[in-house]
Image (cartoon, coloured by chain):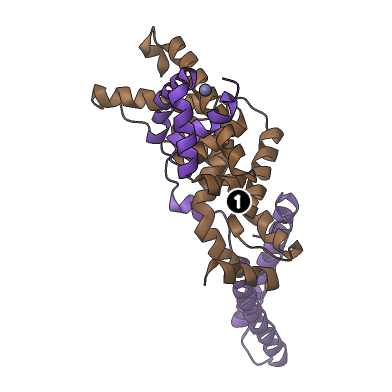
Amino acid sequence: MTESTAIQSCLKHRDPLGFEYLVKKYRREAYMHAMIFMGNAEDAADACQESFARAFEAFSRLQTLDAFYPWFYRILKNCCLNMLSRKKTSDRYRRQNIFHEMEEETPSSLYEKQDEKVRIWDVLYKLPLNHREILIMKYIKECRYDEISVLLEIPRGTVMSRLYHARKAFREAYESITAETQPSKEMIK
Amino acid sequence: MKDCEKYKALIVGLMDNELTPKEIHEVNAHLMRCGQCREEYEQLKETTESLNTMSFNEPQDEVLRKFWKSPYSRWARLSGMLLIAGGWLVLMVYGLIEMIRDNSEPPLPRIGIAAMIIGFFVLLIMVIRERAVTYQSDPYKEIER
Ligand SMILES: [Zn+2]
């Protein structure tokens, strides 16, 4: 099965096997993207589960579809934003399940690198959603501009200028958080 | 310089290696002339390069598998359960009819069969009731899993 035959069989017969193919192909990516919005593993997994169920339903209302993921990304993003507004708690972002934190007995040089990573995640999750979204897509998921342009439905020029503003916002937030934490390094944890 | 705004976006494109040769030429020419943009280029490059070293925790396979369950597996489970229950029902009814028709049996096996039949129906009713209760409180019942 290829992506286009899977899409065709979903469109024509709402074929669970075709859909399963698409889920398997994109679930990892979906999870990472849900992470951008939800900020913790449990909520990201919930959002993915709900979005795939919605997408399977939505196939019956669709005439044609060229590529699965850009369409699915809209469903996923919508679902995440709904979930966020439903349970509006300030501490959704739980850094420990976003990336692997090291054990205490790591050598101090590694530990400093780790501190730096902790700080970067903290900064990213303080930024506005559209800045965080595009920064993670470009620099962590390493998408090219044309891929971002399709997923976010904005022209290439807008990708570049949004990245400029996002990078600038990141830099400012990073500098202010560094200034805050620099005097007492123990405070970071 | 008045058209700096236009070059800000291109500066990011330059850092990301995403420009066409013509754009590279344009933005380099501007950087040569404009100290302000050159400074901005250095600053942006320095602080945001750290982003490239980041990566997400990879999700566990068991987490990923939960995202979507094919309705086939649900149908298969349901039809398996129905077949087993149906088979039992047929055997039970057959036993009951045989027992009523044949009065020559001694009383002990007849009591045994009657107990099994009653027990089976009690269990069946309990399972059906339980299913009905969980169905009512299931928030995802409209969503096919
Ligand atoms: Zn300039």
Q: How many marks?
A: 1
Q: Amino acid at mark 1?
A: Gln
Residue A25 location, x and y as percent?
Answer: 50, 59
Query: Can I make out residue A152 in this image?
Result: yes
Residue A141 horizontal side relative to residue B123, left or right? left
In this rendering, the answer to whether A152 lies above or below B68 is above
Query: Can I make out residue A142 in this image?
Result: no
Please tell me the colour of chain B. purple
Q: Quadrant of residue B144?
A: bottom right
Residue B55 location, x and y as percent?
Answer: 41, 38
Q: Nearer the viewer, residue A41 or B2?
A: B2
Q: Nearer the viewer, residue B15 or A6?
A: B15
Q: Which residue is mark 1?
A: A49
Which image quadrant: the C terminus of chain A? top left
In this rendering, the answer to whether A72 lies above or below B43 is below
Assess disc 1: are there few (<14), some (14-19) or many (≥20) residues with their C-alpha within 10 Å of its C-alpha: many
Q: Nearer the viewer, residue B142 or A165?
A: A165
Looking at the image, the residue that sits furthest to the top is A183
Residue A53 location, x and y as percent?
Answer: 65, 56
**Residue at (71%, 35%) from the top-left corner?**
A86
Q: Nearer the viewer, residue B87 or A36?
A: A36
**Residue at (38%, 8%) from the top-left corner?**
A184
Residue B123 horizontal side relative to residue A112, left or right? right
